[in-house]
Amino acid sequence: MAEPSASSRADAGSSGSTATEVWFFCLRLLGGRYAFEAHLVTEVVRLGPLTRLPAAPSFLPGVFTHRGEVLPVLDIGQLVGQPAVPIRANTRAALITCGPWKVAVVSEAVEGLVAIPRRLLEQAPGESSGVAEFLTAVGRDKQGPVAILDLPRLVEAARARAVPAGGAGS
Amino acid sequence: MSETSDILLFQVGVRIFATPVRDAIRIGSVRDVPADTLILDSSLGRPYSRERGIVVATPDEHLERTLVIDEVLGVRTILDVELRPLPPFAAACLPGGAVTGFVLLDESPMPLVDLPTVVRERLARPNPRI
């Protein structure tokens, strides 16, 4: 039985609703800690050399190959109007699958799975700009505060911003 | 046995692209090409120089246009298993249909472009500077 105090957003985590902790996958981005539903992550990879795409939006800095598959890179910083996440030889990314989209979310560092006590998850401040627009909750673990992202909504917003509604934008 | 395709590699600015050889009618100097049939800037970028071009047919108009490029890097025969589709997210985010996929060359993805689409999209833009 779910704890009455547990946020519905906490249910988005990878553990069962009766657990006292919720598991998320945590990246360091924009100078902070951002986490999202752990089940979205299939793998963590080191980014290879990127191939830039002509006329691509800034949040899509390029593609790379991983085990023979060409994967697009998503830069959340650029999507929310912040500086680009620096891409270096040792930059790592989380491969995520959100519905039909498979993307590599580039990060400053990968923390991996984090367990956040449900009692330490709170509703995100209701802001509608920048990365705050995509937060569903804020929490805290032993490492400090962590912001919980609605990654599927963020990825969908990226797609929607790139292509004007009702057309291919050509 | 795997099928093969012939692709043309060319450079525009700092970027290298691949295209099926069949999309290029001919390649040559643009020196004597009428200015109104040259395409200097397209979704592929703007070349540094104005010396070489790829002549492309525009099926809709039954005309030839010359896409100005910086350099032809050669023709390669590749195995079709080295072709990769455009990832759905990238396809959804790109504003046009010029990039149709990738060719893996030394495991690096090289954008595979459809030159007639590049030309058509450029001509469709308002106030085309050709």
Image (cartoon, rainbow, N blue to C red):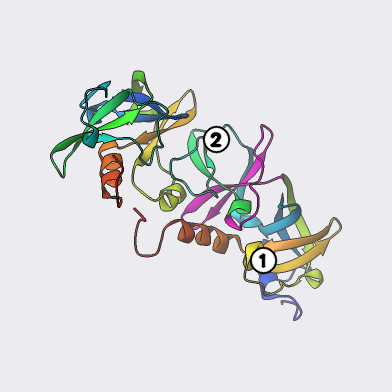
Start and end of the magenta stretch?
A: A79-108
Residue B112 x, y percent position in the rendering: 37, 34
On the image, numbered disc 2 is attached to which residue? A50
The chain letter under disc 2 is: A
- The percent coordinates of residue B38 (x first, y second) are 26, 34
Labelled disc at residue A110: none
Q: What secondary structure is found at the residue carrying circle 1?
A: helix
Residue A84 within the magenta-colored segment of the rendering: yes
Q: Earlier in the sequence, mark 1 or mark 2?
A: 2
Count of labels shown?
Answer: 2
Is-magenta flag for residue B115? no
- Point out the image quarter for the N terminus of chain A: bottom right
Quarter residue A19 falls in: bottom right
Mark number displayed over residue A132: 1
Crowding at dot 1, Cα within 10 Å, few <14 / some 14-19 / many 20+, comes out as some
Task: Residue at 74% x, 75% y: name it.
Answer: A6
At 35% from the left and 23% from the top, the residue drawn is: B78
Q: Position of residue B74 (x, y in %)?
A: 35, 18
Against B81, residue A123 (above or below) is below
Q: Amino acid at mark 2?
A: Leu
